[in-house]
Image (spheres, rainbow, N blue to C red):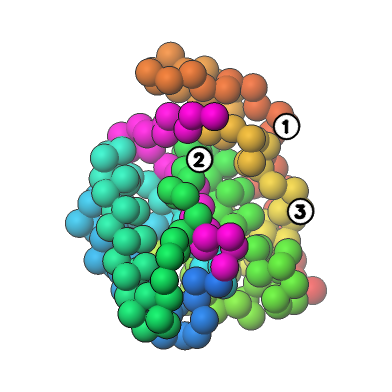
Amino acid sequence: MPRQARLLVDGGCYHILTRGNNRATVFHDEADFQRYGRLIATYFPENGLHLYHYCLMTNHVHLIVEAATGIGLRKAMQGLNLRYALAYKRRHGHTGHFWQDRFKSLLIAKDNYLLQCGAYVELNPIRARMVTAPDAYPWSSYRVYAQGRHDPLVTLNPLYETFGKNPTERQASYRAFVRAQVEPPAGWDRHRAVGSQVFLQHLASQASAPVVIRARGRPRRLTAATPHEK
């Protein structure tokens, strides 16, 4: 079956997923995680990408980004993954294929879906039973939003400002919002784009390739989150 054409839109937001070949481990220790982070810091700014959310798992990577251009997104990810694979092979004596096929990209609407996708990404270590709380996992953006921790890789999601009038309110509301993310955003693993029906219909009218314009369900309203902590 031929590959489905990648859906790239200038100024778009994307969920990027890339896996180790046959789900093999791609990060063995702190040095591996740090190297990948340094390469993000190199390739993303020079190609016009902002990283809003991320989670580096042991055998795959989740990134929520905004890209000035579709070409910039492709160049950044190709350069990042190639450089990391070469460095990994030298350090660990690896031979053969490293990444599983090309990276996957899901276009995300710049509305509540963007926050929902970011929170869902940050909960990966919980679903994998690696930790019992998201702040216990060091290789994600969760603590930036939930605790105010500085991470030079992260540009704050523009919608984060809607969580409160000050940092304390926003952090508490974000913690509550993340706790409410049980199910993945509608269309997460089936479509090439996720968002409201209006967003998908507009996208379909602009795209040169077919776009699935059926969105199941709606994102949770941000007003449903409360700052109450256990």
Magenta region includes residue 7: yes
50 on left or right of 201: left
Task: Give the percent coordinates (x, y) of residue 190.
Answer: 64, 35
Could you tell me which secondary element the residue under label 1 belongs to? loop
Q: Tell me the kind of residue under disc 2.
A: Leu
Q: Which residue is mark 3?
A: 182
Q: Tell me the kind of residue under disc 1.
A: Gly
Task: Give the percent coordinates (x, y) of residue 174.
Answer: 61, 61
Task: Judge depth for marks 2 and 3 and give the one in front.
Answer: 2
Magenta region includes residue 217: no
Q: Is residue 197 above or below residue 112?
A: above
Alpha carbons under labels 2 and 3: distance apart: 20 Å
Residue neighbourhood size for the residue with mark 1, other residues' Cα within 10 Å, grouped as few (<14), some (14–19), many (≥20): few
Task: Give the percent coordinates (x, y) of residue 105.
Answer: 47, 43
Q: Is residue 50 above or below residue 230?
A: above
Q: Nearer the viewer, residue 76 or 120?
A: 76
Seen from this angle, which residue lies furthest left? Answer: 46
Q: Tell me the kind of residue under disc 3.
A: Val
Q: Which residue is mark 2?
A: 106
204 on left or right of 66: right
Disc 2, disc 3: CB below 8 Å? Answer: no
Residue in view at x 35 percent, y 32 percent: 9
Q: Which residue is mark 1?
A: 217
Q: Quick one: label 1 or label 2, which is nearer the N terminus?
A: 2
Look at the image and tell me whether residue 207 can be seen: yes
Look at the image and tell me whether residue 170 can be seen: no
